[in-house]
Image (spheres, rainbow, N blue to C red):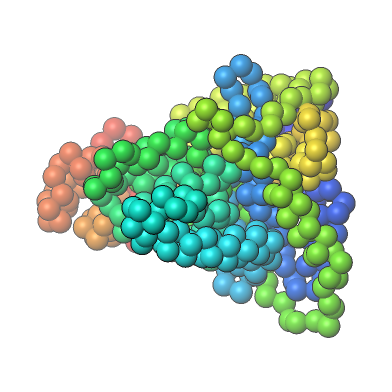
Amino acid sequence: MVNNSELHTENFEKQNEFPIDVIATTFKELIFDLNDTLNFPVDYSATAMIIAISTMIGTSVKVKVKNNWFEYASFYACLIGNAGANKTHPINTMFTPLKDVDKRNHDNYVVEYKKFIKYEKLSKGEKLKVTEIEEPILKKHVLTNFTPEALNKRLNENPRGCSVLSDEMATFFEGMNNYSNGDQISNYLTIWSNQPITSDRVGTPIPLLIKTPFLSVIGGLQPRMLSKVFPMQKLDNGFFQRFLFAYPESVVKKPINDNELNDVIIKRYAKFIEDYIENTNVAEINSCINSKILNWTPDAKAFFYQWQEENCSLVNEHLDNIKGEIVSKYDSHFIRLAIILQIMENPNSDNIEIRAVEGAKKLCLYYINCSFKVLEIIQNPANYLSTLPENKKSLYNSLNNEFTTSEAIAMGAKYVLPERRVKDFINDNILFSHIRHGYYAKKIKT
């Protein structure tokens, strides 16, 4: 049974340490070894491993929750830490086996594509004398540098799905903004939900239709960049709410030591990923992905239902609040994390079992805590103020620590801010306190 008190906000500070005990022993050994030899923080290695396993699984497996409600194990994740905190190396380490598979696929693709080009250069008569060669498709798991069009093409060609790796999430978001003609955020929201997307391109008469897009995203981000990447003004679009954040309490750069990584452990991890990919072919049958369907053992389903009931209480506790929006996404996160833990425990599983849901609960508590911690930074008045347009920053700094509505409107006119926009601005409860009717106070005193 779920302990009700664990799900309430005041208890989240007790969930700061990553619950490493939920990870199967074989994988836990690698996480500890990376910590001992290369100083990789446990939170980062474990989260990177979860996303790597998510990529490995792709659409090969889904969980049936109810009729017409299935969940795939895709995630958007971000490792938070200062420069030198070892955010990038755990990601690269956990994704190395997938990159190795991609390298072999790429080499084979080059050979097959050359054959295709050679065939295409034949005359019609010559083609009749040889076996037809179709254009090959590049199988790819990991994307690092791409355009929106290329992303859709890869998702269309790889029904198993892909993952995006970004050394700095700020770069990932900047890349989105470079393609302002399309609604990239909306596209990523739809993909996270594994709902169909279409891509219409000039010069292509038939648009791409991706019925079951699967994409995981992971990268690192420094705390000082949080307000820039996730500005308060745009938190209502739902993108931030979908992220898992790994944010250790304290990560400092450590000196190199003489401990050496155990090759047996890292090779065992690589073999697990390569064997799973090789033994679980994902293809489309009548335009539908032939995913294996996992069900629930009775005790696991009862555990999930009880947890979800308590999660509803937490959502309702923060109704009409960003925290409530964050927690509401954990109905899906819980199920997806349970898939990961179950496959790590037994890649041939037919059911989600009790250990997987118990582990999913602990992971949800950890990641919710980290999300709330990140939200506090974003909502810090000073951080928030720094993201505003110059005219609003100037207005804020020009106002007295306490002021009236009429004084704000008069001051706003100096910065070409209409009355309506000034009134909206001073009602921002991150920057201002409403003392009484017509009177306000700044939260950052100047």
- Identify which residue is drawn at 72% across, 67% down: 40
Measured from the top left, where is residue 120 in percent x and y? 38, 58
Tell me the quarter of the image containing the C terminus: bottom left
- Identify which residue is drawn at 78% across, 30% down: 350
- Identify which residue is drawn at 47% across, 53% down: 130
Measured from the top left, where is residue 437 in percent x and y? 29, 32
Tell me the quarter of the image containing the N terminus: top right
For this rendering, which residue is in front, 224 or 262? Answer: 262
Q: Is residue 7 left or right of residue 375?
A: right
| Visible residue check, residue 55 | yes
- Identify which residue is drawn at 51% across, 65% down: 110
Measured from the top left, where is residue 248 in percent x and y? 67, 58
Snapshot quadrant of residue 150:
bottom left
| Visible residue check, residue 378 | no
* In this view, 283 is above or below 230: above
For this rendering, which residue is in front, 8 or 18? Answer: 18
Measured from the top left, where is residue 366 in percent x and y? 69, 45
Residue at the top extreme of this rendering:
67
Snapshot quadrant of residue 199:
top left
Q: Is residue 340 left or right of residue 400?
A: right
For this rendering, which residue is in front, 295 or 420? Answer: 295
For this rendering, which residue is in front, 408 or 268? Answer: 268
Q: Is residue 249 left or right of residue 348?
A: left
What number of labels is visible?
Answer: 0
Snapshot quadrant of residue 259:
bottom right
Q: Is residue 427 left or right of residue 137?
A: left
